[in-house]
Image (tube, helix red, strand yellow):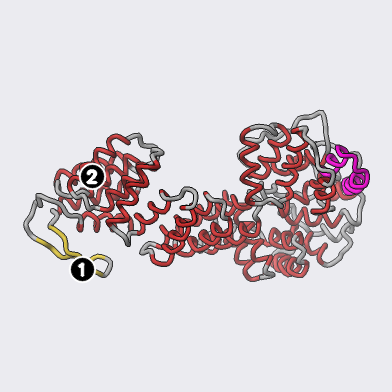
Amino acid sequence: MRRVTGALAALMVSTGVGCVHPSVVERAYGGDVITGRYVSPEAYAAFLRGAIAEAEHHPEDALKAYEEAADRDPASPEPWTRMAEVWCSPGQSGAVSAERALAHAVELDPSYARAWAVRASCAAARGDAAGEGAAAARAAQLDPQGDGANILLARADDAGPAAARSRELLVALTVTAADPAAAWGALASWAEAHGDVALWSRALVALARVAPQQREAIARAAEALAGAGDLGEARTVAAAAVEASESPLPARLALAARLGLDEAIARHDAGAARHRVTRGRLGLDEAAGRALLGGDRALARELASTAAAADPGALGARLVLAVADGADLLGPSVLAHARDTPASGAALVAFGAALMHVASPAQARAVLLGIPRLALVAGDDRVTRPAVELVSRGVLPGDALPPDGVVELFVVAGPTTAPLSVAPDDASLDRRHRYLALALTQPTSPLARELAGRLRAVSPSDPVVVAAAAITQLADGGPIAPDAPRALLARNPADPLLAAVALRLAEKVGDADVARRAQETLSALGAPRRSVE
């Protein structure tokens, strides 16, 4: 209701010529007494209907109500301003009508800052940068303390050296703004557009605190950060989104729920991990498996023990406990008394990774194929990347991988006659894996070049981004620096994705030593290398 109440206040304090009633009235608003001209109850009622219809996304009903308000209160610029705002909103095609309405609003009251602010927004919507800048400057001049006017001005005055000035203005607004949510939201948008990941993360965390109703958008932003390779910031933002409300995150935000859980695991905070299991609609065996994959054996044991105590037949928890306790992973006691309920992807992959150290691929495959499992989540590096190794060794079937894992496996498995089975435009691929898929299939495409520029600026050391860049360089056919294969392998000699690309580079430049070491990493995954099943 804040938006509707604010709209009524704007109607109340707007001034103009030809008042319909000679009286001046005082009304309380936001703890202050505001003096304004008289407005008829009928005009208020019509305006309120319009504001409610607009808030509920019924533009035609909103326009009809605002037109009635304008008829009943012809001296007020606010109904005309609101009509213009509706005509300029996404999905509407009323740019001409909007400009006419704004011209009339400004004619009624040239000093009405809101009309100029809406004119700036409408200009931005139609791509008129000059018009946006001029209108935003006028709005800020008329209302120097106005949050909206200053946000518009910062956005409009954002070219070249002015970008730093815009950043400073938006940061300052987060302290002084009457509407902190608008200020932090504007700063988040600016930071995202300018690739300032640290500022974007900071703004999103603050936005989750002051505007918890935006938690879903913030959770999606966390997933986007992860998709660009910045997992640390992604986990911080996801944790803020999870904690923004007592209600669980929607199931469609499964990756954000796991990122928020990983933030608690990184702090070794068992209490926060249990809490986020509930908020994220996850299971304790998921948390335990993720802790094990993250190298925290003690936390994994604690979480799995809690799950097993509540349900002795919990399969995923028993798998994690077997690894954490150093049990015989091939012994019958591991799966004894376990029900047919599926194990989480994290628990299964953590168990499989440990199993490979004590069993042959054939033995491990026989055990894992008998365990019902939940599907892996796209974009979940903590689980998918080790799962790629298990598929490479033949321990898990290829259909266990989500699309991003299939793309990585295509690189790790080596050249085959079969084409990549995942299209670069697959909606489940994050930016990094879309770039990798394009590097494999369309390395010179405009989209591949665009993603390369954006990702190298944000996450130049991410292994997927590095691998995609090297594959693109190979496809270009240009000269390869002699030390490129060695530098690539040195990033992480145990990473099969980097090893596979380093091998190709080494073969290209004739570096036998790097080729040998890269092949040793890949041979540990099982020979010969092969494609997805």
Judging by the rendered image, the residue that carries numbered circle 1 is: 33
Note whether 423 is above or below 82 in the view shown. Answer: above
Q: Calculate the distance from the C-alpha at mark 1 to the C-alpha at mark 2.
A: 25 Å
Residue lying furthest top in this view? 417
Q: Which residues are magenta?
A: 500-523
Q: Indicate yes or no whether the magenta region holds residue 40.
A: no
Note whether 143 is above or below 486 in the view shown. Answer: below
Q: Secondary structure at mark 1?
A: strand
Per the picture, the main secondary structure of the magenta-coloured stretch is: helix
Disc 1 crowd rating (10 Å Cα; few below 14, some 14-19, many 20+) is few
Judging by the rendered image, the residue that carries numbered circle 2 is: 80
- Disc 2 residue type? Trp
Q: Is residue 460 left or right of residue 76?
A: right
- Identify the residue shown where x is 70% and y is 64%: 311
- Disc 1 residue type? Val
Is the N terminus in the top left, top right, bottom left or bottom right quadrant?
A: bottom left
- Identify the residue shown where x is 38% and y is 62%: 179
- Locate residue 72, reporting x and y percent: 14, 46
- Locate residue 288, reporting x and y percent: 72, 62
Q: Earlier in the sequence, mark 1 or mark 2?
A: 1
Q: Which quadrant of the view contains residue 471?
A: top right
Residue lying furthest front in this view? 161
**Picture disc at residue 218:** none
- Identify the residue shown where x is 16% and y is 60%: 36
Q: Which quadrant of the view contains residue 13?
A: bottom left
Give the total number of marks visible in the rendering: 2
- Locate residue 423, reporting x and y percent: 67, 33
486 and 253: which is toward the camera: 486
Q: Indicate yes or no whether the magenta region holds residue 506.
A: yes
